[in-house]
Image (tube, coloured by chain):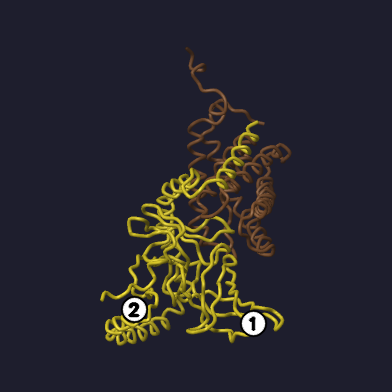
Chain colours: A brown, B yellow
């Protein structure tokens, strides 16, 4: 039996076990940072959504398939750490946003520095207002519209400013553990 | 196809969360997640807190000398006051029993707990603290610090607990204005925002600067007399039925490092009859 035949097929072969471990570790570190250091270093009382930045950067680097999986699990992890949220709602929003980023990245200019920053800005706006709308529809206790607009605006600004620092790290992790068999655009 | 599968999975989780009772699979998943992630958060907090404190200290350097003098004066005063304290406390407890008043928070068993992490969301205000069931903490225990009421326990694991902060829109506490003033309901409006005090009659004599404390009556979970904040604004026209009052909270919710959990709540706060 050749070595080629013994390799796993499908999504595992595409992503690679070492890469799954590295991406999982990156998301967990993002969760820990968002709930400790960044929760104290707030901008006018607002916490940046680092998990979303990491998810969007991964979707931008690796496409919609990786984006969907990391979006779901990153969002679910955030949901499970919240005391009284609707579990699965952040997972749903991040899954859809990451899919959209992964699909539209082919239209971004090659090696553009601004493209991932722009992707995070737009994705954050969609995620913030999308989450607020769905949470209100599902009857979650909510603050006023003015507060939501203030929070969304500051999170968009904060996430945009974080992207130039986060994107190179995420891309390095994604490329460092990339398996031989890859599907790239 | 993958997108559809994960969207369906998300909707299934949302549905499960809506349908589950207090001990469902989502609750267990939450407990496991907090237990696994909390040690990592504790590590990050332990490493980064001294750095944050260092920068805070630099910013406050100019105020330190004056604060030192003030604290020395307060210490001397506190030492003088403390001499007669045990006797006063015993008398106070005796009178409370006779008047069938609820137990004061000052005489309760309590646990000091470090803050491990904050809620990662901008729409929910909660903390995870580093003490849990093993230290006697239970759901609905009141949480406070030296400044006043912080919130209440909403989830307890073996070594960790989750505190819902008073500023959360889902949090509320029965309160009264001043020592013998009107009573109402204090509710949160989100981090950085003032609290709302409702159900105060429009004819009541509430003014800006009045102290607001927990009421602690009936089946309320908070003991009486814990400071909540001060009246910041009083509104409401003569035609209205109740006043629109905002309260500036005493606690600085952004810089909590340690909190005190009172280990008695609900019915346990009712006065215990003296043995005849």
* Chain ID of residue with mark 2: B
The quadrant in which the N terminus of chain B is found is top right
Which residue of the protein is positioned furthest toward the top in this rendering?
Answer: A1
Q: Secondary structure at mark 2?
A: helix
Q: Nearer the viewer, mark 2 or mark 1?
A: 2
Q: Identify the disc placed on residue A127.
A: none
Q: Secondary structure at mark 1?
A: loop
Which residue of the protein is positioned furthest toward the right in this rendering?
Answer: A107
Tell whether B242 sits left or right of B146.
Answer: right
> Between marks 2 and 1, how big is the CA–CA gap?
34 Å
Tell me which numbered mark, 2 or 1, is placed earlier along the sequence: 2
Q: Position of residue B115 (x, y in %)?
A: 42, 61
* Chain ID of residue with mark 1: B
Tell whether B244 sits left or right of A12.
Answer: right
Tell whether B163 sits left or right of B200.
Answer: left
Q: Are marks 2 and 1 on the same chain?
A: yes
Residue B84 vs residue A179, the one in the foreground? B84
The quadrant in which the C terminus of chain B is found is bottom left
Q: Residue at x 48, y 50 (%)?
A: B22
- Compared with B120, B272 (above or below) is below
Residue for badge 2: B97
Tell whether A107 sits left or right of A58.
Answer: right
Q: Identify the disc placed on residue B202.
A: 1
Q: Residue at x 33, y 59 (%)?
A: B135
Q: Which of the 4 quarters of the picture holds residue B147?
A: bottom left
Q: Position of residue A139 (x, y in %)?
A: 64, 55
Residue A52 vs residue B193, the one in the foreground? B193
Q: Position of residue B270 (x, y in %)?
A: 39, 71
Q: Residues within 10 Å of mark 1 (few under 14, many from 20)?
A: some
Q: Residue at x 60, y 85 (%)?
A: B204
- Compared with B17, A176 (above or below) is above
Q: Position of residue B110 (x, y in %)?
A: 35, 67
């Amino acid at each position: 039996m050749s070595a080629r035949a013994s390799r796993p097929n499908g999504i595992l072969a595409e992503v690679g076990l070492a890469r799954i471990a590295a991406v999982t570790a990156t998301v967990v570190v993002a969760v820990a940072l968002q709930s400790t250091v960044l929760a104290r270093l707030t901008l006018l009382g607002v916490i940046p959504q680092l998990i979303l930045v990491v998810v969007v950067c991964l979707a931008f680097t690796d496409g919609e398939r990786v984006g969907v999986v990391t979006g779901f699990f990153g969002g679910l992890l955030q949901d499970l750490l919240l005391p009284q949220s609707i579990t699965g709602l952040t997972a749903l929003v991040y899954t859809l946003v990451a899919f959209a980023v992964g699909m539209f990245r082919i239209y971004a200019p090659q090696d553009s520095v601004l493209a991932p920053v722009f992707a995070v800005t737009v994705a954050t706006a969609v995620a913030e207002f999308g989450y607020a709308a769905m949470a209100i529809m599902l009857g979650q206790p909510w603050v006023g519209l003015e507060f939501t607009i203030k929070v969304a605006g500051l999170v968009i600004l904060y996430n945009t400013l974080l992207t130039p620092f986060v994107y190179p790290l995420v891309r390095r992790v994604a490329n460092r553990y990339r398996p031989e068999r890859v599907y790239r655009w | 196809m993958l997108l559809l599968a994960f969207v369906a999975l998300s909707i299934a989780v949302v549905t499960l969360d809506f349908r589950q009772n207090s001990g469902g699979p989502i609750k267990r998943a939450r407990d496991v997640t907090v237990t696994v992630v909390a040690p990592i958060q504790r590590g990050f907090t332990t490493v980064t807190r001294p750095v944050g404190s260092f920068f805070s200290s630099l910013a406050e350097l100019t105020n330190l000398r004056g604060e030192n003098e003030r604290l020395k004066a307060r210490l001397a005063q506190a030492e003088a006051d403390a001499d007669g304290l045990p006797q006063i406390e015993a008398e106070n407890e005796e009178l409370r029993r006779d008047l069938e008043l609820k137990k004061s928070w000052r005489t309760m068993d309590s646990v000091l707990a470090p803050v491990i992490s904050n809620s990662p969301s901008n729409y929910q205000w909660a903390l995870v603290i580093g003490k849990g069931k093993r230290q006697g903490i239970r759901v609905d225990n009141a949480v406070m610090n030296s400044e006043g009421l912080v919130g209440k326990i909403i989830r307890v694991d073996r070594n960790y607990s989750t505190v819902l902060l008073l500023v959360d829109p889902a949090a509320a506490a029965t309160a009264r204005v001043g020592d013998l003033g009107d009573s109402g309901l204090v509710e949160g409006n989100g981090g950085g925002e003032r609290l709302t005090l409702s159900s105060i009659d429009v004819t009541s004599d509430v003014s800006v600067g009045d102290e607001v404390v927990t009421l602690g009556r009936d089946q309320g979970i908070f003991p009486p007399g814990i400071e909540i904040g001060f009246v910041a604004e009083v509104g409401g026209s003569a035609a209205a039925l109740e006043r629109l009052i905002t309260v500036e909270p005493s606690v600085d919710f952004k810089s909590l490092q340690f909190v005190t959990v009172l280990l008695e709540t609900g019915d346990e706060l009712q006065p215990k009859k003296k043995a005849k």
